[in-house]
Amino acid sequence: MGNLMSASFAPECNEVKTKYDNCFNEWYSEKFLKGKGAMNPCEQLYEDYKACLGKALTARGIKNMLDKSREDAPFEVGGRTQDELNEEIGKK
Amino acid sequence: MKFVSSQCSFEYPWDYVSASAWKKYPNEMSSHVVAVDVLRRELNPETGLLTTERLITCRQPIPRWLLAIVGGRDTSYVREVSEVDPVKKTFALRSCNLTMNHLLSVNEVCVYAPDSSDSSKTVFNQTARIEAYATFQRLCNKIEDWSVERFRQNAAIGKIGFESVLQKLASTVPDGMFKEVHTA
């Protein structure tokens, strides 16, 4: 299945990313979709991957762009923009 | 400002399509997507929603007239936040460009949901709001038209590419979960 995995933008993170992706994909199909997702066996793998990414995002100057976008479309509201949120309120 | 949308249907149930959507890239059709990274992912214990923030790295040829304006970079970044509701069976992805955004903003919303008339199929809705910010209206129009055209092209090849991923994965699923569907 190696050829079906996407790469990281930071090649130095590819190895930890692949391990994490494999773990996540199995959890998603076998646990999460079946309503048994509460336990997450991939947490430690994700921490490793995230630590690698964090360095790369700062070093390559992507973090600033991300932070701007996070203000416009926060994670906490599923990436909705203020316009979208207003529209949804209007519909209710 | 322009709105553009595209719809299509996949001959697989939502569970299978949603699991495969995480493995959509790489596929031979969408070679402009060179990397996909998970920046943050959380499962909300109360709502049951899985929220994921990803960074998508693209490398796509840019026309010469536009290259002069953006300064010769061919790598672009997109931030995407998605929500999966495993009970309602919806997978919504919202994305926005991080690069070239002083010139152009492309806000896209994609949703995978079961076909309401046939649960063995999944419908995919994709809409984008495209807005260019240039000093001259004529240039705005030109940039927006180019973006709309690229949206259409990418939507068409995106479907073919994902279709090939769905087929490939279907042949590698060991057993259980989705098997009854592709032999049908």
Image (tube, grey):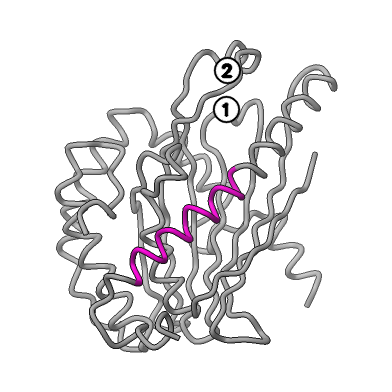
Q: Nearer the viewer, residue A84 or B13?
A: B13
Magenta residues?
Answer: B154-170
Kindly identify the residue that appears in the image at 62 percent across and 27 percent down. Answer: B102
Dot 2 alpha-carbon crowd within 10 angstroms: few under 14, some 14 to 19, many 20 or more: some
B179, above or below A84, in the image:
below
Q: Nearer the viewer, residue B97 or A47?
A: B97
- Give the SS element for disc 2: helix
Kindly identify the residue that appears in the image at 65 percent across and 58 percent down. Answer: B126
**Quarter-of-image position of residue A11:** top left
- Provide residue B121's location: percent of width, then percent of height: 56, 79
Asked if marks 1 and 2 touch (Cβ < 8 Å), the reply is: yes
Determine the CA span between mark 1 and mark 2: 7 Å
Task: Give the amino acid at mark 2.
Answer: Val
Q: Nearer the viewer, residue B123 or B49?
A: B123
**Quarter-of-image position of residue B179:** bottom left
Magenta stretch contains residue B93? no
Total labels drawn: 2
Task: Give the amino acid at mark 1.
Answer: Met
- Provide residue B24's location: percent of width, then percent of height: 41, 57
Task: Identify residue for label 1.
Answer: B100
- Chain letter of mark 1 equals B
B86, above or below B94, in the image:
below
Task: Identify residue for label 2.
Answer: B70
**Left or right: A5, with A69 as reference point:** left
Question: Reading the chain from its start, which is encountered first: label 1 or label 2?
Answer: 2
Q: Nearer the viewer, residue B79 or B33?
A: B33
Residue at the outermost front position: B183
- Give the SS element for disc 1: loop
